[in-house]
Structures are given as structure tokens and as C-alpha cells.
Amino acid sequence: MLNKILLPVPLALAVGHAFAADLPVFHADTIVVTAVKTEQPLRVETDPRAPRQPVPAGDGADLLKTIPGFDVVRKGGSSGDPLLRGLGGSRLNILANGGFVYGGCPGRMDPPTAYLFPDAYDKLVVIKGPQSVKYGGGLISGAVSFERKTKPFDEPGLRFDGSLLAGSADRRDAYADLTVGGALGYLRLIDSHNEAGDYRDGNGQKVHSAYQRDSQSLIAGFTPGRDTTIELSGDFGRGHAAYADRGMDGSQFDRSAWGVKAEQRNLAPWLDAVRLAANHSYADHVMDNYSLRPLPPGKPASASNPDRTTDAAKLEADLAFADIELTAGADWQKDRHSSRFGGRDYASLPRVPDQHLERAGLYLEGSKPLGGGKLIAGWRHDRARAYYDATATQGEQLQDYRLYSGFARYEYKLGSWTPYAGVGVAERAPDYWERSKVSANRNVLQPERNTQLDLGALYQGEQIKGSLSAYLSRIDDFLLIDTKASQQTRNIQAYRYGFEADAAWQFAPQWQLSGSAAYSWGANATDDKPLAQTPPLSATVSLAWDNQRWAAAAVWRVAAGQDRYAIGQGNIAGQDIGPTPGFATLSLNGGWRVSKAIKLTAGIDNLFNRAYAEHVSRGGADVIGYDRTLRVNEPGRTLWMKLQAHW
């Protein structure tokens, strides 16, 4: 049914009217997002709810994969681990509504993005590299922030946003966002549901990958004056996911969180705003070998139930002195982790605390016009304390770190060009997963320190827009996971460089050619090997037609083979398996803007049903009823349709 309504009508219209001089140039939002453009140096912003191709899964990781520089470690249908420029885990800070999100699984079954539903947020912000200090400490790779921005009401009113999606592998998504309010405040309710069965790869083989997620968010805002906002929020998520890369599945992904934010604006000529925020998050995760797969004959039922509690607070102020704008802040965080193991009776067993962490930080970030351009700089100091609880093996141990981060970047406006150059330094302490893989004295691990040079330029012309960003990085005491070593976590010396580029050319009315490319290179100088889990060169090219009523596009993605690898080495998300061949896929989409309020889109991903796997994909595991593969393959041909409404 889907392939009968996808493209013939819009493509026929496109061919007939491609170069008609009387048609207006398309300026509204694109019907389907096929490329995310960089409009600020080292910062990307996008709408997480916009239809996009390839169609993302029901969590945050596959949404990030549509942004140049990101890759995802595939394990199944969802809950992949995102990497930015080949680095992820605790090197990539993940925030939701201003608070940090962490998973609890020792095997990274539940990365932070597994608990985040893109439809529940209004904006996604990505910071590349150590080029900000406002998103927490240790931006070795960068930061990802899922944000909500509820617009206040001037008079009583109602807003609604919602969508329905259906696709291959019994994919069914739905979300609804309802806000009611008036001059004194608002009440907002967001509900989302995401589910799919096992998908098939390009060889027609079924992959153990079914999942289901549900989430609800409730936000209450109080706006007694135009310059005052007080907001309370609660988020609740439940779900489960099957995995093709291991002997257990995620039978429970439960997360409950609350937050409070207060902001006062226009306090004085030198004080633009003061913000106070506090939040609490609790993740309760269960993995077992019997709920979502057949239990092998003779093998006992096994379950693990880690949980993680995170409390945090932040005080921040925006200051202005002459032409200098500053943001000063302090933040605090406490993180507690415990586990219990057993069979089907695991819930009756006591939880055993194993690690807890505390961190406090001070930061200052600002900008100043300088020499026809702008200087942006920041400094941050964090004190991190990591404890191994007394009930853990070897008794309580304390690791105390003083960590510093800072950056400076100069941006210059030169006609349609904005060239920039920046240098940044970020320090990060070993995280829960890295410390868990040390069998002897944990104090042997040193914090890693990234010193990075960023160079690039933006171009904003009438018909052509584009960006190029390149980086050169040295990471001292890089925390490497080496599964072939007795002490699996150790410090090494690492060097990295790479680039991202994107461009869009409006070469005729209603027609646009766009593309992006990303490349990362890394070396392990200590072992004289490539730095493991580094993705190869990849690029995407899109040709799109859009007359504000109908739209159609073709998207071609290609990735080079990767012959630089280090078997058994990697990070907390995965380790190298061996070389990978290159691949290319073609996808098509079409859309119809039914009215100002309703939009219908549909597409075919991986049109030619290619069988392939990403280089950073996890290795396949034995699951009864499924064929084992070397890596977890990507989905084969996938059809989807999405209906979106907005009032």
C-alpha cells in the first residue's frame, strides 16, 4: 500500500514544473528532513519532531545519527549507543530538560538516549568538541541537550501537536502534545508510544530487535509576569527491548524524573537573567535471558537489576557589561548506583550499592566583539569524587579529582563567510563503567585530558549555504577498554583528527541539492595501533523538490570500508571486531502538506534492500530462532508513513 502512494504524483509534478520562472522559491520548513545544516560554529540545532529520513527509532540515538559526525553502535532495534566523532559514553554529555541522564547497565544496555523520546522535546542542541562549559564538565567529544521551550500565553488558549507513524516490522509510533494556558501560566501534557517487531536485514534474515516504549511528561508553568517563569515537570518512561548482540535482553527500562526551574529576566541593566534549576532522575533497569527470548535447554534463568539515582542542581546568571556578555554558574550532582542479581526471583533480593559519585562545578562563559569579529571563551573547574561502597569487593575506596576545562574561539564575519578558530581543553574522570573493569587498585586510572584545535567556516549565500569544521586532538591518558588485557581499562596516549562538512544549493525554484560528509581518524600511540571504534568516511547526498504543497526527495548514503582497527579494543559501548567493507544505500521520500495544520509524509529507506553493518556495530550473538551474524546488520528495505498535525 505504501509504495503505491509514495512518489509518482510529486515526482511527475516536479518534472513538469522544475524550472518554471513564476514559481516562488521555497522558504518554509522542509516537509522531510534529509540533512541537518550547521548555522553556528560547532553548534547544531534541529527539531526532533520533524519527519526525517531514514526514519529514526523511538529513542534519541537514531535521531542523532541523522546529524553529520554521529554514528550509532547498533545492538537491536533501539537503545543504540551514540558516538560523536568516534567518541561516546561519558565523553559525550547527554542532558534532558537541563538535567543529566545516565543508564545503569554495566554492559551499556541502557545508554542515556534509551530513556529519551525525541517527540517529548522541542529542540535538540549539539555542541561539537570542548567548545562550551555550560553543559557540564568533561566535554571530550561534545554535548547533546534535549530541550523543552514552552511558549507562554498572552491570553487563554490551547495548542496541540501530534503524529502517527506506521512502517515495516510492525512499526507503530504515536505522540500527542497538548498545552492549555493563559496569562498566568500553562499546563502541558505529552504522551508518546513507540513499538516495533523484529526487523529483517538485507538478506531477509530476522534480527532479534523488537521493542516497545511508552512515556508521559507533565509540565506546569507559572508566569505571574512577563519576565518571570516558574516550571515544574515530571517524566515517566516504561519499555523493553530485545538485543541481537548478547545473551540477555532489556526486559525493563523504567525511568522517573522530576524537575523545577525558575527564571527571572530583566533584573537590571547589567543583569539580564537569573535561573535556578533542580532535578531528580531514577532509572530502574532489568536484563534477563528469559522474558523476550526462549531460554536455552539446560540453561538457568538469569536476571540483573541495576538502578541509578541522580540528583542535580544549577544556579546560573546572564550578565552584561558594556559590550561583554557573560554567563556565570555553579552546578552540583550526586549519582548513586546499585545492583542485584538472581533468577526469576531477583526482585525479592536486596540491592547492593557498589559506586556513587559526587561532582560540583563552577563556570564562566562569555563573548565580546573584537576586531570586526567576536571572541567567545569559557573556563570551568570541577571537583569529582568517586566512591566504591564498603559492601563492594576490597571495601570502600575514594578517588578525588580536580578537573579543569576551558576554551577560546574567534569568529570573524567576512561577507557571506564566517571563518573561525578555537582551542579547547577538557578533563574527564573515569566513569562507572571504566572503573568497573579494573580488577586491581582502581586508583591506577588517571583522568583523561583532551586538548583540541577546531578550525572551520560557515557560508551563507542566497542560493548556497554550507559549513566546514575540522579538528586536531591530543588526548592524554585516554581511557581505553581492552578486552584482551587482564585489567580491561587502562590509560594510553591518543591522537585524533577529522572533519564534518555540509552544503545546500538552491539551484532552481523548488529544487535543492544538499549533502554532508564526516571523517574521523585516530591513533593509539601507546600500542602503536589505530584507535579502536573509529568510524570510516561517510557521506550523504540528497536531491529534493518542494513546492510547499507536494515534495519528493532521493537520499544516497555511502560509507567507505574501514581497515584501521584494533581487535578487542574500544570503549564502554563496544570493541573492534575486524575490518568492514563499504556500502551505499538509496532512500526515497514524498510528502503532501494537506493544510497549514496537517502534513502527510512517506518513504522507503534502503530501497535496494542492501545487507550491511556499520563498522561500530556490535557483534552478533546466538539467539534461538535467529541466524547469527558477524555484526548486527542494519535494517533492509523499510517502508514508513507519518501523519502530523499541529494547531
Image (tube, helix red, strand yellow):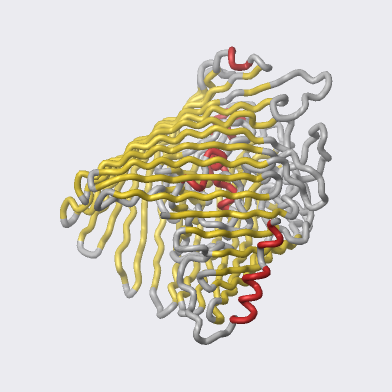
Q: Position of residue 266 (x, y in %)?
A: 19, 53
At x 69% / y 59%, what residue is drawn? 604
Q: Position of residue 205 (x, y in %)?
A: 81, 45
Q: Please state which of residues 204 and 432 is positioned toward the viewer in this rendering.
A: 204
Q: Please state which of residues 181 and 430 is positioned toward the viewer in this rendering.
A: 181
Along the horizontal axis of the image, is 289 left or right of 141?
Answer: right
At x 60% / y 31%, what residue is drawn? 105
Q: Please state which of residues 57 and 415 is positioned toward the viewer in this rendering.
A: 57
Note whether residue 510 is visible: yes
At x 81% / y 43%, what residue is drawn? 629
Along the horizontal axis of the image, is 644 left or right of 148?
Answer: right
Figure quadrant of the N terminus: bottom right
Q: Residue furthest bottom?
A: 21
Does 312 sit above or below residue 543? above
Q: Residue furthest left?
A: 268
Q: Position of residue 508 (x, y in %)?
A: 55, 81
Q: Position of residue 347 (x, y in %)?
A: 59, 16
Figure quadrant of the C terminus: bottom left
Does 469 sit above or below residue 311? below
Residue 522, quarter of picture: bottom right
At x 57% / y 32%, what residue is drawn? 253
Residue 241, quarter of picture: top right
